[in-house]
Amino acid sequence: MDKGALRVLVVEDDFLIASTLASDLRRLNATVVGPFADIHDAMQHVGDVDAAILDVRIRDEMAFPVADCLLNSETPFLFYSAYNGGAIPGRFGNVELFSKPTSGQRLLHHLRARREAVRPAPQTDVAAALPPLRLEARRLMHETEAADRLAEAALRRAIASRLPLPDEQRDLEAWLIDLLRDEYRRNGARLMT
């Protein structure tokens, strides 16, 4: 991948900060996805990016559902906020918090370094297919608990089918995600309760 082609999700609700940051990142040859001032809008794009910059609080919501999806998909991200580290749950202990203002160049440099350090070795086991499955469930269902119920229902169907698992990891992920989407079409409304 070309070093300048990094696709960066920006989640920031302050218009001036978001505009300045997006402009800085574009000037540094990054592709900006967003900026988004809504958690649910941002969630729709988590799978389309190489890295992300998240404000901790977006309007009256915390950005932690987006951070969870990024963490589950092993997508490097950082928090960019006026909040101190005490506002961030312990599960994000390895995620850097940059205080506002920080230059876009410094943020992008950190994300590139994290991306290089996080590249996972290819795996072909079921456990490796779970993060993409959870990510897709959270895209389909905005409520975290409902998304988890949807992923669980898809896994139960996979187990009950007793079909042989696909050989390749990509095929396994695609198969599980197809089951998840079918489960959403069939029972999505019921899983919301």
Image (spheres, grey):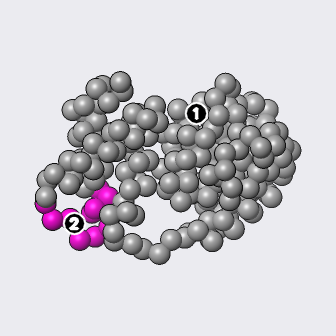
Query: Crowding at label 2, few (<14), some or many (≥20) Cα neighbours within 10 Å?
Result: some
Q: Earlier in the sequence, mark 1 or mark 2?
A: 1
The segment highlighted magenta reads 163-174
| Quarter of the figure that contains the C terminus | top left
Looking at the rendering, which quadrant does residue 164 occupy? bottom left
Query: Crowding at label 1, few (<14), some or many (≥20) Cα neighbours within 10 Å?
Result: many
Q: Which residue is mark 2?
A: 166
Q: Nearer the viewer, residue 187 or 105?
A: 187
Q: Which residue is mark 1?
A: 39
Up-down relation of residue 148 to residue 102 (above or below): above
Image point (34%, 71%), residue name: 124
**Residue 189 is at least partly visible in this image:** yes
Looking at the rendering, which quadrant does residue 56 occupy? top right
**Residue 22 is at least partly visible in this image:** no
Does residue 127 appear left or right of residue 78 in this picture? left
Tell me, yes or no, whether the highlighted magenta stretch contains residue 171.
yes
Q: Are marks 1 and 2 in contact (CB under 8 Å)?
A: no
Does residue 183 appear left or right of residue 107 in this picture? left
Label 1 – label 2 distance at C-alpha: 34 Å
Q: Secondary structure at mark 1?
A: helix
